[in-house]
C-alpha cells in the first residue's frame, strides 16, 4: 500500500469500530452509573480562556509544557487553550452560573495534553468524570470514591488498586508550610542520592519530587516525611471520616502518604486508581480529590469541591490485559439482499429501520452470491432475499443465517416477524 499523504497528528488516533463501539459502551455504562448516583451531565466547551487553566498551577507540567494554546482572530485576540482536563472548566461554569449547591455533574469527552506519546499516553485522550461542588462533607468524598471503585468493578476489573492521601486544608496553611519545610529539609539532606531531574523539580515544586517514578529517587522518597502526620485536627477528622466510610462499604484502599497528584489545586482528600495489570509509568486509570479553593481562584464564591476523572483509553487497555469488557456485538439484525436493482432493498430497509430493526444492504447491484457473502460477513441473524418472484408475490425470502433454513414471508408481515424473533 502507498504511504498515505497525511496521518493523524502525533499522539492522536483514529478509533474505528469495533474499538469505538466498546469505548461508547464504556462511556454509556459510566453515564448510567453516574446518573443513578444523582449526577447530571455537563457539556462544556472544548476550549477555554487560557487563564482558566493557569489556575491548575504555574509550576505543573500541564500548564508550563503541555498546553495546546492559541490566539483567536478577535481584535484584540484572545488567548485560548484546548482543555487539558475538565475540573477547572467546571469550576469556571459554577462561578458563571451559580447553580444551587450541592451541584453534582458528570462528564465525558476529549482532553488535550502536549505530552511525549507512548502506550497509554496520548495528546488527545478521553476522560469520564464527576464533580460535586458546594459541600465539604466527607460523605461526598466517599460517595465519589465509591462510584469510581464500583465502576471499575462493574467492568469486571479486579486489579485496580485505590491509593488514598490527605493534603490538609487550604485554611490549614500552617501545617502545609510546616510539612513543606520538613520535606525540603529531607530532600536537601539527601541531594546526593536524588536524580538530576528530581533536583530540578526540587527547585520548582518540592512536593512533586514525591511523584518521581525514577528508581534512583525511590529510597529518598520512601523515607520522606508524610503530610498525614502534619494535618490539623479538622483535616485529620475529615480524613478519618473518609476512611471510615470506605470501610463501611467494604472498599479496600491503601493509605499512600506520598501520593501527590500532577495538578496543584488539591486540598485534603486525594486519591488515585492504578491498575496492577498496566506498566508502571502509565498505570493510573483515574484520580481525583478535593479542590476547596479552585472556584474562588476563578472569581467565584468560596466553594468546596471534590471529584475525579478516569482515563477511558487506559481503562480499555487494562480491560484488554485482564481479558474483560469485550466489545459488544454490533451486527445488524437483518441484511437485505436485493437482486432486482436495489430499490426493493431501499424500501425494505426503510420499513425495518422505522420499526426499530437494524438493517443493512449492499450497493452496486452485485450478484446474489456476492451479496450473500456480504450478508454473511455482516454478522446479521437474518438475510431478507428479494428477487423478481418475491416482488411479484409481495413477499420476501427470510433466511435464518444460523441454520440456513428459509421460507417466504409477506412483506407486510416482515417487520412484525423479525421483531418477534428478536425478542424470543
Ligand atoms: P489526572 O490525574 O491528570 O486528573 O487525569 C485523570 C486520568 O486521566 C489519569 O489517571 C489517566 O488515566 C488519564 N490521563 C491523563 N493524561 C493522559 C494521557 N496523556 N493519555 C491518556 N490518559 C491520560 C485530572 O484530570 C483531574 N481533572 C481529576 C479530577 C477531577 N480531580 C478532581 N476532579
Image (cartoon, rainbow, N blue to C red):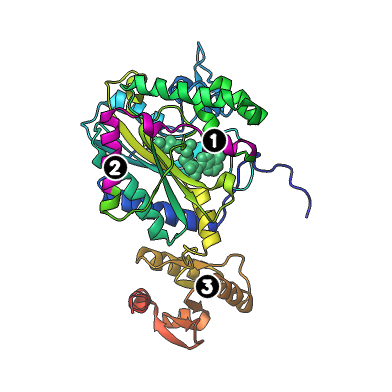
- Let me know if residue 134 appears in the view: yes
The residue that label 3 is drawn on is: 379
| Side of 109 where 137 appears, left or right | left
Residue 232 location (% of width, % of height): 30, 27
Label of residue 242 in the image: 2
The residue that label 1 is drawn on is: 221
172 or 186, nearer to the observer:
186
Q: Earlier in the sequence, mark 1 or mark 3?
A: 1
Q: Main secondary structure of the magenta part?
A: helix
The quadrant where residue 87 appears: top left
Q: Which residues are magenta?
A: 216-245
Q: Is residue 32 above or below residue 111?
A: below
| Side of 265 where 342 appears, left or right | right
Instruction: In the displayed orientation, state which residue is furthest to the left.
Output: 100
Please name the residue shown 47% across and 83% down the image. 400
Q: Earlier in the sequence, mark 2 or mark 3?
A: 2
**Would the CB of label 2 be found within 8 Å of ligand 1?**
no
Q: Secondary structure at mark 1?
A: helix
Residue 57 location (% of width, % of height): 47, 23
Q: Is residue 185 above or below residue 167?
A: above
Q: Is residue 228 above or below residue 302?
A: below
Mark nearest the camera among 2 and 3 is 2
Please name the residue shown 29% across and 34% down the image. 236
Category of crowding for the residue at label 2, using alpha-carbon neighbours closer than 10 angstroms: few (below 14), some (14–19), many (at least 20): many
Residue 46 location (% of width, % of height): 46, 33
Mark nearest the camera among 1 and 3 is 1
40 or 252, nearer to the observer:
252
Residue 303 location (% of width, % of height): 27, 26
Category of crowding for the residue at label 3, using alpha-carbon neighbours closer than 10 angstroms: few (below 14), some (14–19), many (at least 20): some
Please name the residue shown 41% across and 55% down the image. 152
Amino acid at each position: 500500500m502507498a504511504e498515505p499523504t497525511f496521518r493523524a497528528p502525533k499522539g492522536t488516533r483514529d478509533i474505528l469500530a469495533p474499538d469505538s463501539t466498546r469505548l461508547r459502551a464504556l462511556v454509556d455504562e459510566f453515564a448510567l452509573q453516574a446518573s443513578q448516583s444523582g449526577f447530571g451531565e455537563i457539556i462544556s466547551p472544548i476550549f477555554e480562556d487560557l487563564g482558566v487553566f493557569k489556575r491548575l498551577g504555574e509550576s505543573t507540567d500541564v500548564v508550563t509544557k503541555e498546553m495546546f494554546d492559541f490566539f483567536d482572530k478577535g481584535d484584540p485576540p484572545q488567548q485560548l487553550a484546548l482543555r487539558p482536563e475538565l475540573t477547572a472548566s467546571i469550576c469556571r461554569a459554577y462561578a458563571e452560573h451559580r447553580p444551587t449547591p450541592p451541584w453534582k455533574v458528570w462528564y465525558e469527552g476529549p482532553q488535550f495534553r502536549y505530552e511525549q506519546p507512548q502506550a497509554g499516553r496520548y495528546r488527545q485522550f478521553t476522560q469520564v468524570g464527576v464533580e460535586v461542588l458546594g459541600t465539604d462533607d466527607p460523605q461526598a468524598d466517599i460517595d465519589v470514591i465509591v462510584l469510581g471503585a464500583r465502576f471499575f468493578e462493574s467492568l469486571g476489573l479486579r486489579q485496580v488498586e485505590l491509593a488514598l492521601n490527605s493534603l490538609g486544608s487550604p485554611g490549614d496553611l500552617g501545617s502545609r508550610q510546616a510539612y513543606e519545610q520538613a520535606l525540603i529539609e529531607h530532600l536537601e539532606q539527601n541531594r546526593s542520592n536524588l536524580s538530576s531531574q528530581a533536583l530540578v523539580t526540587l527547585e520548582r515544586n518540592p512536593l512533586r519530587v514525591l511523584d518521581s517514578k525514577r528508581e534512583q529517587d525511590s529510597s529518598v522518597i520512601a523515607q520522606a516525611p508524610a503530610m498525614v502526620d502534619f494535618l490539623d485536627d479538622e483535616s485529620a477528622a475529615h480524613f478519618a471520616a473518609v476512611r471510615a466510610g470506605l470501610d463501611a462499604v467494604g472498599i479496600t484502599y491503601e493509605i499512600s502518604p506520598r501520593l501527590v497528584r500532577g495538578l496543584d489545586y488539591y486540598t485534603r482528600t486525594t486519591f488515585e486508581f492504578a491498575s496492577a495489570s498496566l506498566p508502571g509509568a502509565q498505570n493510573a486509570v483515574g484520580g481525583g480529590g478535593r479542590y476547596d479553593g479552585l472556584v474562588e481562584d476563578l472569581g467565584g464564591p468560596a466553594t468546596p469541591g471534590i471529584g475525579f476523572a478516569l482515563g477511558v483509553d487506559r481503562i480499555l487497555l487494562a480491560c484488554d490485559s485482564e481479558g474483560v469488557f469485550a466489545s459488544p456485538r454490533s451486527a445488524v439484525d437483518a441484511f437485505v439482499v436485493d437482486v432486482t436493482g436495489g430499490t426493493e432493498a431501499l424500501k425494505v430497509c426503510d420499513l425495518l429501520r422505522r420499526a426499530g430493526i437494524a438493517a443493512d444492504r449492499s450497493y452496486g447491484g452485485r450478484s446474489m452470491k456476492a451479496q450473500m457473502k456480504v450478508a454473511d460477513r455482516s454478522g446479521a441473524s437474518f438475510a431478507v432475499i428479494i428477487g423478481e418472484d418475491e416482488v411479484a408475490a409481495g413477499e420476501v425470502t427470510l433466511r435464518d443465517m444460523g441454520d440456513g433454513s428459509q421460507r417466504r414471508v409477506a412483506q407486510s408481515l416482515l417487520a412484525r416477524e423479525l421483531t418477534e424473533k428478536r425478542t424470543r
